[in-house]
């Protein structure tokens, strides 16, 4: 039984960008999703030059490639919790 538990835990402990609260969807297949934690500086410069502000965030795939950003260890990951989800603490408080 312990052996089976060791095989299952690593599968569920992996963190995906799509489950992070900083994830910006591309409204398609989320292949080109972006991360709010890493704005692109060059788009701020374009805004000052021509007055056009673009969606200036790095792609999630880029952020996961570099350890200075989020990296493979997902340093900036924060779990996204929808309004419909409740945590165990919320349930305990509501029941009191």
Image (cartoon, rainbow, N blue to C red):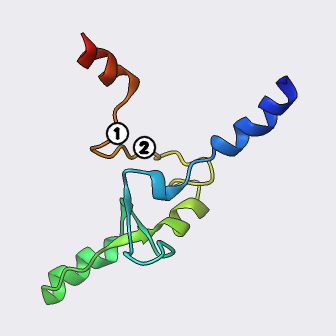
- Residue placed most toward the observer, 29 or 70: 29
Quadrant for the C terminus in the image: top left
Q: Position of residue 7 (x, y in %)?
A: 80, 38
Circle 1 Cα neighbour tier, 10 Å, few/some/many (<14 / 14–19 / ≥20): few
Quadrant for the N terminus in the image: top right
* Label number found at residue 85: 1
* Rendered image quadrant of residue 24: bottom left
Q: Secondary structure at mark 1?
A: loop
* Rendered image quadrant of residue 16: bottom right
- Residue placed most toward the observer, 38 or 35: 35
Q: Tell me whether the residue at label 1 lies in contact with that at label 2, contact meaning CB atoms closer than 8 angstroms.
A: no
Give the Cα separation between the discs numbered 1 and 2: 15 Å
Question: Mark 2 or mark 1, which is nearer the start of the sequence?
Answer: 2
Q: Is residue 6 above or below residue 37?
A: above
Instruction: Give the left or right position of residue 44, taking residue 26 as reference.
Output: left
Q: What residue is shown at x 19% (from left), y 80% (from top)?
A: 53
């Amino acid at each position: 039984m312990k052996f089976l538990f060791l095989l299952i835990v690593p599968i569920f402990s992996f963190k995906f960008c799509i489950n992070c609260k900083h994830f910006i969807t591309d409204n398609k297949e989320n292949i080109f999703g972006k991360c709010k934690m890493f704005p692109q500086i060059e788009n701020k410069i374009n805004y000052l030059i021509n007055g056009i502000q673009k969606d200036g965030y790095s792609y999630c795939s880029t952020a996961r490639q570099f350890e200075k950003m989020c990296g493979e260890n997902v340093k900036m990951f924060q779990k996204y919790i929808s309004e419909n989800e409740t945590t165990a603490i919320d349930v305990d408080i509501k029941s009191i």
